[in-house]
Each structure stands twice: as C-alpha cells, then as structure tokens.
Image: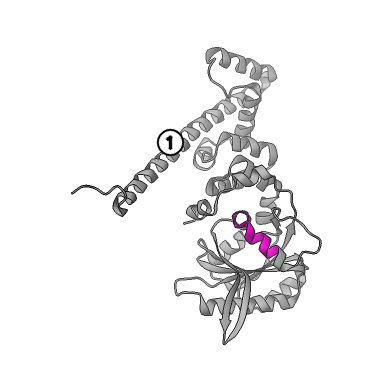
Amino acid sequence: MPMLINSDEYLSTIESIKQNIRTAQYRATISVNKELLLLYHSIGLVINEHKAWGNKFVENLAADIKLAFPDVTGYSVRNLKYMAKFALRFPDREFVQAVLAQITWYHHITLMDKVKSADEHIWYAEQAAKNGWTRNVLVHQIESGLYQRQVLVEKVSNFENRLPSPQSGLALQTMKDPYIFDFIPFKEDMVERDIEQALVKDVTKLLLELGTGFAFLGNQYHLNVGGDDFYIDLLFYNLNLRCYVVIELKTGEFKPEYAGQLNFYLSAVDGILKKEHDNPSIGLLLCKSKNDLVAEYSLKDMSKPIGVSAYRVTSNLPEELGKQLPSIEDIQSRIK
C-alpha cells in the first residue's frame, strides 16, 4: 500500500524525527560548551596559581598560544583575564561542570561584568539556562534588577499561612516587587484598562516579566456568579504551581478594599474553574505604589492566598531586544 505523504501518521513521524534531531543538536551544543567552559576554567586556575608572575605572564601566554595555534580564537589577553576571574569566583571544577556549564562563555562574561556576587551570578546563570535567555535578554534582566526584585526583596503576601508547602514557597519565589513593564509606552493619564490592554497587546513580554510557568488565559475574563457578571483584569494558569493566577491592576496606591475584591474573585475562580487536580488559586494585586504595613494588615485575615506588589511603567525596552525575546510557544514549551 503506497504511503500518503500528507497523511497524519507520516506528518507525525516526520515531526518526531525532527524533534529528535533538534534534541541531539541541543545536547551536542551543550556538550561542546561544557568542554570549552571547563578548559577555560582550568586555564584560569593556572593563571591564578602564577599570579605572582604579573601581567606579563598573561601577555606572554596569549602570544605563545597564538603562535602554537594560529587559527584558534578565544585566547586574547582580555579573554585570559576573564578566565582567571571566572576561576577565582568559582574555583570548584565539579560545581562549574554541574551548575554553570549550561550557558555560554559569553553569558558568563556578561555576568562577570555586571554582577558582583557569586550567588547572584549563579542565580542568573540558572535562570538563563532554564528560560533560554539570549545574552541581550540576560543583560536586560540584570539591568532591570531582577535578582533584587525576585530574591532579595521583602515580599508582601499571606502565602505561608494560606498555602501548603511546597506551593507556598514556590509561589513566593515566583513573586517580584516591583514588576517592570518597560515595554508599555508611558502616559500620565493612564487608567487600569489602558495598562491592561497594553500588557495584553504584547503578551510575550508580559510572560517574560511574570516568569516561568505562566500561560495567558484572557483579560477581562468573564465570570457569572449567581446571575451577576464580574470581570477579572488578567487570568493566567501557572503550570509549575498547577493553579490559576488572578491579577488585578490598580493605577493608584494600594487600598485595603482591593484585597477584599480580589479575595472574592479567587473564591469565584476556585468555585467555577478550579478542577480537582488544581491547587488553590492565587491572587496578585499590582498597584502603582503601596504601604507595606497597610498591605500586610489587609491580607492578615483574608481567606485566599494573595500577594501585593508595586509595578513600574517605563518605555526603555530596546527595540532590538524585543526581537530576541522568546515567543509564547517557546515559553510554554519550556514550562511543560
């Protein structure tokens, strides 16, 4: 029986083969990158062992390598100094191989230039590997202070008291404060709907800022409760947390009544949309500004898990960076 070239079985088989090729190519790239990184690390260790010889040692080493391998690049004086800096920051070869070899050497150069602490370097390296950030996207995340906004900041939420472990910890790790919506053109008279529509207009960049695992379900999401109509600003499903995430936007300072409204929306989502296998829905209230103590008191007796963060709207996202951001499909494929 002749094979139909456009049959579902044939197309499925071809897609499977293509995926296997892509996977093999990715593994080969990672393998080559790992070997190169370990080589650079070992050279850096040697340079550091002989630092008493001074800068002339590095200059002579670069010249001798060039003489021995005239067609090989990557061993300039500048790059050899980066190797030494990298080995000084991370002297453990096994740690480098296990944790840091998942991103390119040029990513690490960026991190050495822009990040001072080893802990921050490691965190950005892990995020870049997990999310497939290009070097330019990495630079943008560093310059937006993502580590400070997501790791170091004191976050306002009741997650620990309203969610079981480990979901409470994961939800808290997901939060940022403030959120940076630097892809929205700023206008002085913007209202909630303006910001919401601008965010939805560029969902890919919104998902990048929200972080790993978010799938966009809709804006002004309609819920009918007892014959009355209600509309959620932004509704997401987080595949890592396995729960719905309701986001409400406010253009002014946080007010206690905002938490009550969001608490109601979460009850409605849990009652109407949540399935048996889903975890409790989470609410995120984004305000132009907030008084942390007022927000903490407001959340204290709320029955649903809610976080409160500020947001900033600027318009300084470089155009060329926007072109390098992963597509919605790319993001969602990485979080499955």
Identify the residue shown where x is 49% and y is 35%.
34
| Picture coordinates of residue 18, whole percent (x, y) | 38, 43
Q: Say what amino acid the circle numbered 1 marks.
A: Ala
The image shows a total of numbered marks equal to 1
- In the figure, is residue 289 to the left or right of 322? right
Above or below residue 63? Residue 245 is below
The image quarter containing residue 78 is top right
- In the figure, is residue 268 to the left or right of 308? left
Q: Which residues are magenta?
A: 195-209
Identify the residue shown where x is 52% and y is 68%.
243
Magenta span contains residue 272:
no
**Secondary structure type for disc 1:** helix
Instruction: Please name the residue that numbered disc 1 is placed on.
Output: 28
Identify the residue shown where x is 55% and y is 76%.
269
Above or below residue 254? Residue 111 is above
The image quarter containing residue 51 is top right
| Picture coordinates of residue 249, whole percent (x, y) | 69, 68
Inspect this view and state whether residue 303 appears: no
Identify the residue shown where x is 56% and y is 31%.
41
Query: Residue furthest toward the top?
Result: 67
> Closest to the observer: 96 or 260?
260
